[in-house]
Each structure stands twice: as structure tokens, then as C-alpha cells.
Amino acid sequence: MMKTYNSLIIFILFSLFPLFSYGEEFSISSKNNLISELRPGQKVTAGFMDITANKDAKIIKIEAELIGRIEAHSMMMNDEIMKMRKITPELVKNKKYKFQPGGNHLMFFGVERKLIAGGEINLLFTFQLKNKKKLTESIRFKIK
């Protein structure tokens, strides 16, 4: 009886253990964070970066002050026609994801602020983890 009781207690404790362990916090690292300078009269530009997360996550929203909307896009050439599509980037744990010219990149629409070479801007990224938890992180970009 006592052996069964002890086994039951151990089973319950190990079953509940995940409820009490919080694990590693979500974090990202990024580099080569660049936004192209706005050309006179334009309100659309592109951005690039390398980003790595310590957990699987999707980038579900990107925003910044005085920018109408920011989207992640893929770009493909079909014959001589460039095709862009809006995407939801999926970051794989500890694997670099590249936003780069000629491939996946960030598009900025309705830019109402001056983006002048040498300046900087913060973008607010919203990530969704596999458990559906949403987290935000501010990432600084240089304007070139």
C-alpha cells in the first residue's frame, strides 16, 4: 500500500512539474537591420535584416509611427516579371531568417515620416509562439 502511495505521489509531482517550470524566455537577435531611404515624392520603401529567435515563432505584425503599414513579402522572378506576395515569416528555433534584396523583405507603405540616410527608426514586431502566446519586441533599424 505504501509503495503504491509513494508511486502515486511521484507520478502526480512529475505530471504537475511543467505547470511550475517556466523555462527559457523568448528572445531574438538581429543584425544588418536596414531600411532604404525614401526617394523624393515616394511613400513606399523596403527593409532588410537577419533575425534569429530562440524559439519557433511567427512574425504576425510589424508597425512604426507615421508608417501606414509594414508587411513581409516574398519576391520571385517569373520570366522577366517580378512577383511579390505578402507572407507570414516563420522563424525556426536558432536558425537565421534573412530579409534580403531579391528575396524575402519588408515593405513599408504610406510612409509619412522622413527616412533620411544616416537616421534610425524603431519597428515594433509582434511574434506568436507555438502556444499562441503573443510577444512584442522593438528592433532598431538604420536608414541607408
Image (tube, rainbow, N blue to C red):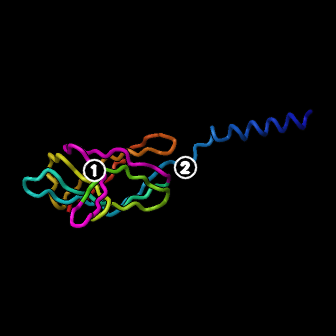
Instruction: Name the side, left or right, on which 133 lies relative to 41.
Output: right
Q: Label 1, on which residue? A: 122
73 drawn magenta: yes
Query: At which x and y percent is residue 52?
Result: 43, 58
- The residue drawn where x is 45% and y is 52% is 27
Instruction: Name the side, left or right, on which 140 lies relative to 3.
Output: left
Q: Label 2, on which residue? A: 24
Query: At which x and y percent is residue 128?
Result: 43, 44
Query: At which x and y percent is residue 43?
Result: 14, 50
Q: Amino acid at mark 2?
A: Glu
- Which quadrant of the view contains residue 96? bottom left
Extent of the magenta region: 55-82
Q: CA distance from mark 2 to mark 1?
A: 25 Å
Query: At which x and y percent is residue 57?
Result: 45, 49
Q: Amino acid at mark 1?
A: Asn
- The residue drawn where x is 54% and y is 49% is 24
Q: Residue furthest front?
A: 79
**Majority secondary structure in the magenta region:** strand
